[in-house]
Image (cartoon, coloured by chain):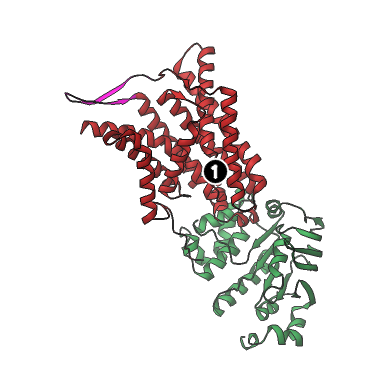
Amino acid sequence: MLAVENLHSGYGRIQALHGVDVHVGQGEIVTLIGANGAGKTTLLMTICGKPRASAGRVLLDGQDITQRPMHEIARLGLAHSPEGRRIFARMSVLENLQMGAVVADPRHFADDLDRVLTLFPRLKERLTQRGGTLSGGEQQMLAIGRALMSRPRVLLLDEPSLGLAPLVVRHIFQLIEQINRDQGVTVFLVEQNAYHALKLAHRGYVMVNGRVTLSGSGAELLENKEIRAHYLEGGVIEQ
Amino acid sequence: MEYFLQQLINGITLGAIYGLIAIGYTMVYGIIGMINFAHGEIYMLGAFISLIAYLITTTIGGGSVAIGLLVALAVTMVFTALWGWAVERIAYRPLRGAPKLAPLISAIGMSIVLQNFTQISQGARVKPLPPVIKGGVTLMQSEHFTVSLSYLQIAIVLLTVALMAAFTWVITRTPLGRAQRATEQDMKMAALLGVNVDRVVSTTFVIGAALAAVAGLMVTLYYGVIDFYIGFLAGIKAFTAAVLGGIGSLPGAMLGGLLIGLIEALWSGYFSIEYKDVAAFSILVLVLLFRPTGLLGRPEVEKI
């Protein structure tokens, strides 16, 4: 469904991705784990068109979207809940969700809003509140909810667990699974929280310094010695 | 008392005009973080286009003032908006992502170009327009002084209030306004969600220019003379109004415009007309000393 082939990208003269190949199949949850600065966020942003890829291709349903402008990519069914959540802080929760529906058919709006609010009842209580006044966990829910408002086929999630309490993280990951299972949305999840991510995902990739160094099923990667040593110390204590 | 009331009326009228121009400054600053120094010139173009449109319409249309004004209003808004759009397209868009100083210099350049273009194409002499909307009502009369409110002043204030109300509605209630605010807060995120950011920025310039165009028409009618240089001072005043109210804040621009108009009118009424600009700018300095974000500006800190 989403395929990244030999992707090179970076900022100015600094290259962050050195030929990345990633494949996400229809209905899958695929995760990409890696340390800070490995290039995970750059990969997601390059898929969405900014920064532009300097070489390689991004294919969505076999269609080359590498050179498409950012705002057109959203129209093709790709939604992104970015790093740092990027909630519109001075807009209400409802307005944030409306912004998520910019590319959607307005006739679906009521249904989609209902669907998102059923998934995140907390947001329902806060519809008129400004986005900036929400707690971290609520903001994360809003960011995911906003992405879902466009009825995406592929959902890109960039570190949804960042800065959240363990209990909230578990809840968010349950919801991601639910979105994938019940709504058939393909999920590409970028995480530092390797344990949770690999447990949830069907398949996973490991990224080091702008290259994919390992890949396999979630369970396989969880058992991998190298990964246990590098990414799961402490993480395994959690259940 | 009567004198004060008269200056108050004059100040509100002037403030309405400044407010309309100030909205253009504050919107553009809000969305792309630059001061569009060519905005005063856009207003000046509005004044010229309105004069030309009015004269042509009344000549062809048999001299009906009402029709002449309505046509002039529509034509001025459309043509000035086109200028605003073109300026963004030519002078600012290629510089998006460049260091902040670059578009600023480009704006100053654009302002000089527009001024000189008008000077050459329209001539350097002042262009007069005989009073179009005459008469008024006498509000109060004493032995020495008559307080009058001209129909033109009423028209200016009413039109301004109507435009500002319509504009506020667009920004707060419509999908266009929502996209506008979202782009203002986080351009990249708006683009990720499918907002065509370039189009939103263009629309911002078009709206700002259309409002400045109305201000241009009003000034042509109110003062009866215009020249190619009026954009400079009016631009700086309106910019001051925007900063005074809090740059980036729309109600701030309206409030700032009103205050600058009042300060100017009252100062020239009670002290000296020569120093009215000094008074306006001194208030700006004072306000900024104690409230650097302006009266209604928001502080930079926000919970993330």
Q: Quadrant of residue A66?
A: bottom right
Identify the residue at image location x=58%, y=33%: B114
Identify the residue at image location x=46%, y=20%: B128
- Residue picked out by circle 1: B36
Q: Is B301 located above or below residue B12 in the figure?
A: below
Q: Which residue type carries mark 1?
A: Asn
Q: Nearer the viewer, residue A116 or A21?
A: A21
From the viewer's perspective, is B229 left or right of A5?
left
User: Regarding mark 1 in the picture, which secondary structure is present there?
Assistant: loop
The location of residue B274, given as percent across then percent down, is: 35, 34
Which tint was used for chain A? green
The location of residue B217, given as percent across then percent down, is: 47, 27
From the viewer's perspective, is B61 left or right of B196?
left
Can residue B253 be seen here? Answer: yes
Within-10-Å neighbours for mark 1: few <14, some 14–19, many 20+: many
Q: Is A83 located above or below residue B84 in the figure?
A: below
Q: Looking at the colours in the rendered structure, which chain would you say is drawn in red?
A: B
Which residue is farthest left? B143
Q: Nearer the viewer, residue A172 or B275?
A: B275
Callout 1: residue from which chain? B
Q: How many marks?
A: 1
The location of residue B34, given as percent across then percent down, is: 55, 48
Task: Give the main secondary structure, helix, strand or loop, of the magenta stretch.
Answer: strand
Q: Which residues are magenta?
A: B133-150
The location of residue B248, given as percent across then percent down, is: 48, 50
